[in-house]
């Protein structure tokens, strides 16, 4: 019991440490500041977060983490568990050969891969981004059209990473990130002026002297009454999204030109997913589309 | 509000909003039958009559009730003087002295008189100067400089009635100078004659020279007098004549919002924003709309293109599915998958028609749709997110037919899915386990 508690606490600490480290230099958006205009509850975004989390926690995490724990203790059962995990990922992850040669469940892996993750941090990062950018995109589309767009972006991301990579290399690809990249692209298209709340250690440190000066001179008014220190920073979404796009662009071009072997992050899927955002125009609400094309706020 | 007042109000609205003199006459006559002591009703009735003798009778009835009614007195002056009318301004024959181009000799003469007046003011002889300005006004009844100075000094000397007479003389002559009407409003306000102020304001806002800013400022004066409803009524009429004025539409939205009529306010903000957001007013209206649930207009509800757009979105999904199923080879989808894609488009369109676009033009009408009963809709849609759903004038496909279309569309989509994703469905039923799965040891060793 104490061992389990210790394990759980160390896990939480790991997550917090990961959050602090990963959000110190670069901002990590965790929510957007805009108000939703049609519905207050993003059913599908929440459902997708729950579904992704459940699939990982119930079907993947036990084999992965118990397997590693057992393996470290020298228990051979750990290898079996980890082999189970590998089998799941290789069977239900997205591989082009499954489509080309009719293996596993073929085209259905494009869906199954979208709901699987490689580890907890992979899941956590994706779900934070899904919440940040999905909520308002869902509001802009309505729940069912949003779900269709999400699945389409995920499918296009998988398809693109398979078709555009000339390398004869076929490791399985898992994760919701292709679909979420689509949401990020759609968010940029629909809400270019939006702001996001970020965890950003460096940003908080940079902000502090600015606010001190603002308090001293009483200007600008918004900063002169703001708290001196904030753990979160509000920044415009577009620089962050452009940074994301550029960050994915170069490695993706490298993959497309040289057929590099994908390992770790599938940048090409992210890039293609991001570009799939253009199809949001098919799925956004009617009035929103009309407002979008006439230059009004959506 | 009693029945007489209600009829009076409707009569005024009929004349002002709908320009329906016949209906206005009927309502006002009915109102006067119930309350013959309503002097304003007699004056409004006069506006609905073209026969000068009968008009005069109406004005006399108003004066019999209130001999000090300035508006009635002014009307009587005009009628006796032979000018056609001041009622709507539309039928009026302007006095030849107003709005006319002066001859060179007259211009010279007026300039000289104005110079003399200035000299007299400098010499401290204000009365003399006023005489000169009045002299100018005798030549050109709405000379702006002479009017401004004469009225200004008369007011300072407390000769408000004289100032008022000069102004009304110009207005009766049909001047188009908005500043003169504004002065008349100021004088009426100063004298506490709010009915007169309203009447002048109404004439002013209908002048071709009255621009958006001026009309908005007139409306503000009414609001300042806490006459929100009058301001609303006036602006509503003016907007019909200035349907593309973003400033007035936004102002109308503001007034409705202040009156607690949010749905109406949204309609006006929406109209203003639809005219474009490149102007300050457009952006303001757009910003105000952001605070509310967006509106779906009949144009969007009835759009076939927007419905087809949604069907196209569904079709794109099926194309991507087919692409996967064809071994990631888009050029070899095969006839079956293309047929599936076609079915997906048709099925998607039917599903969209049944669910999100049941008011498409002309489909809804062809399929026997009718405009739903407003009373019923307002009950049903009390909690609707769309604030103008009650105002939709488009026919909607009957519920039963929508259900059938929806089921048909869904059926076609299922068939399309089977056609485009056939290989994957077969593999789902009979999976082929991959044979190249590495073991964890191999992965850890970096295979």
Image (cartoon, coloured by chain):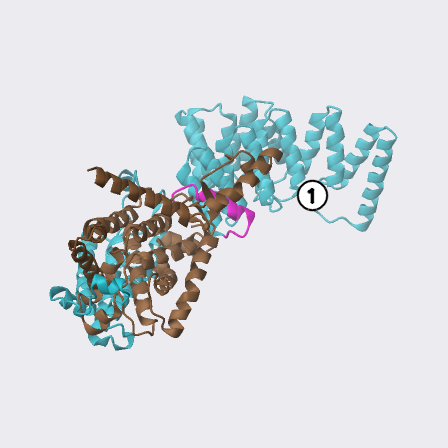
Chain colours: A brown, B cyan
Residue B386 in the image: state x and y as whole percent: 34, 44
Disc 1 sits on a residue from what chain? Answer: B
Q: Nearer the viewer, residue B346 or A165?
A: A165
Residue A188 visible: yes
Q: Residue extending furthest left?
A: B430
Residue A23 in the image: state x and y as whole percent: 42, 48
| Residue B95 lies in quadrant | top right
| Residue A16 lies in quadrant | top left
Residue A173 in the image: state x and y as whole percent: 28, 63
Residue B241 in the image: state x and y as whole percent: 52, 47
Please tell me which residue is depicted at 78% across the width and 50% down the height of the picture: B103
Q: Is residue B324 left or right of residue B106?
A: left
Q: Nearer the viewer, residue A238 or B41?
A: A238
Please tell me which residue is depicted at 41% across the width and 70% down the height of the picture: A254
Residue under label 1, please give it.
Answer: B98
SS type, badge 1: loop
Q: Is residue A83 left or right of residue A140?
A: left
Magenta highlight range: B276-295
């Amino acid at each position: 019991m104490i061992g389990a508690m210790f394990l759980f606490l160390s896990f939480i600490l790991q997550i917090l440490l990961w959050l602090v480290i990963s959000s110190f230099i670069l901002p990590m958006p965790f929510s957007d500041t805009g108000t939703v205009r049609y519905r207050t509850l993003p059913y599908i975004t929440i459902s997708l977060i729950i579904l992704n989390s459940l699939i990982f926690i119930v079907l993947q995490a036990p084999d992965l983490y118990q397997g590693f724990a057992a393996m470290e203790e020298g228990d051979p059962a750990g290898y079996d568990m980890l082999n189970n995990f590998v089998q799941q990922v290789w069977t239900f992850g997205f591989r082009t050969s499954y489509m080309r040669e009719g293996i596993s469940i073929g085209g259905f892996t494009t869906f199954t891969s979208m709901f699987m993750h490689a580890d907890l941090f992979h899941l956590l990062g994706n779900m934070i981004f899904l919440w940040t950018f999905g909520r308002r995109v869902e509001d802009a589309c309505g729940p069912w059209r949003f779900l269709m767009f999400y699945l389409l972006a995920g499918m296009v991301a998988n398809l693109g990473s398979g078709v555009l990579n000339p390398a004869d290399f076929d490791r399985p690809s898992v994760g919701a990130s292709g679909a979420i990249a689509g949401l990020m692209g759609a968010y940029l298209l629909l809400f270019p002026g939006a702001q996001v709340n970020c965890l950003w250690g460096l940003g908080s440190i940079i902000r502090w002297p600015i606010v001190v000066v603002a308090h001293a001179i009483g200007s600008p008014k918004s900063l002169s009454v703001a708290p001196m220190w904030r753990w979160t920073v509000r920044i415009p979404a577009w620089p962050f999204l452009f940074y994301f796009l550029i960050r994915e662009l170069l490695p993706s071009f490298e993959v497309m030109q040289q057929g590099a072997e994908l390992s770790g992050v599938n940048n090409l899927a992210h890039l293609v997913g991001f570009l799939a955002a253009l199809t949001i125009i098919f799925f956004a609400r009617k009035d929103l589309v009309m407002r979008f094309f006439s230059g009004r706020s959506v | 509000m009693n029945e007489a007042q209600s009829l009076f109000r409707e009569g005024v609205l009929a004349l002002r909003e709908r320009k329906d003199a016949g209906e206005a006459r009927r309502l006002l006559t009915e109102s006067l039958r119930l309350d013959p002591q309503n002097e304003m009703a007699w004056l409004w009735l006069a506006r609905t009559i073209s026969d000068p003798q009968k008009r005069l009778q109406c004005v006399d009835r108003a004066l019999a009730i209130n001999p000090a009614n300035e508006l009635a007195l002014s009307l009587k002056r005009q009628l006796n003087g032979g000018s056609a009318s001041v009622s709507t301004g539309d039928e009026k024959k302007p006095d030849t002295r107003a709005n006319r181009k002066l001859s060179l000799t007259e211009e010279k003469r007026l300039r000289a008189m104005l110079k003399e007046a200035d000299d007299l003011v400098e010499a401290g002889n204000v009365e003399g100067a006023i005489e000169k300005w009045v002299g100018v006004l005798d030549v050109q009844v709405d000379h702006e400089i002479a009017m401004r100075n004469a009225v200004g000094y008369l007011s300072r000397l407390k000769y408000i009635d004289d100032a008022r007479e000069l102004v009304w003389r110009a207005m009766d002559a049909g001047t188009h100078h908005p500043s003169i009407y504004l002065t008349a409003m100021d004088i009426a306000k100063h004298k506490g004659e709010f009915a007169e102020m309203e009447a002048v304001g109404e004439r002013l806002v209908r002048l071709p020279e009255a621009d958006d800013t001026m009309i908005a400022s007139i409306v503000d004066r009414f609001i300042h007098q806490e006459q929100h409803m009058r301001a609303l009524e006036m602006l509503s009429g003016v907007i019909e004549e200035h349907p593309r004025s973003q400033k007035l539409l936004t102002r109308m939205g503001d007034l409705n919002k202040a009156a607690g009529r949010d749905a109406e306010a949204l309609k006006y903000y929406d109209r203003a924003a639809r005219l474009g957001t490149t102007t300050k007013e457009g952006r303001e209206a757009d910003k105000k709309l952001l605070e509310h649930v967006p509106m779906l207009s009949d144009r969007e509800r009835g759009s076939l293109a927007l419905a087809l757009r949604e069907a196209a979105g569904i079709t794109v999904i099926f194309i991507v599915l087919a692409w996967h199923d064809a071994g990631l080879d888009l050029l070899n989808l095969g006839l079956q998958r293309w047929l599936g894609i076609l079915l997906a488009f048709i099925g998607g369109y039917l599903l969209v028609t049944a669910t999100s676009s049941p008011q498409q033009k002309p489909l809804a009408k062809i399929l026997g749709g009718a405009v739903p009963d407003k009373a019923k809709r307002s009950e049903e849609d009390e909690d609707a997110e769309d604030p103008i759903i009650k105002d939709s004038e488009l026919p909607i496909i009957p519920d039963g037919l929508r259900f059938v279309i929806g089921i048909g569309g869904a059926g076609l989509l299922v068939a399309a899915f089977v056609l485009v994703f056939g290989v994957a469905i077969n593999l789902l039923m009979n999976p082929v386990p991959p044979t190249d799965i590495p073991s964890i040891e191999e992965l850890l060793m970096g295979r």
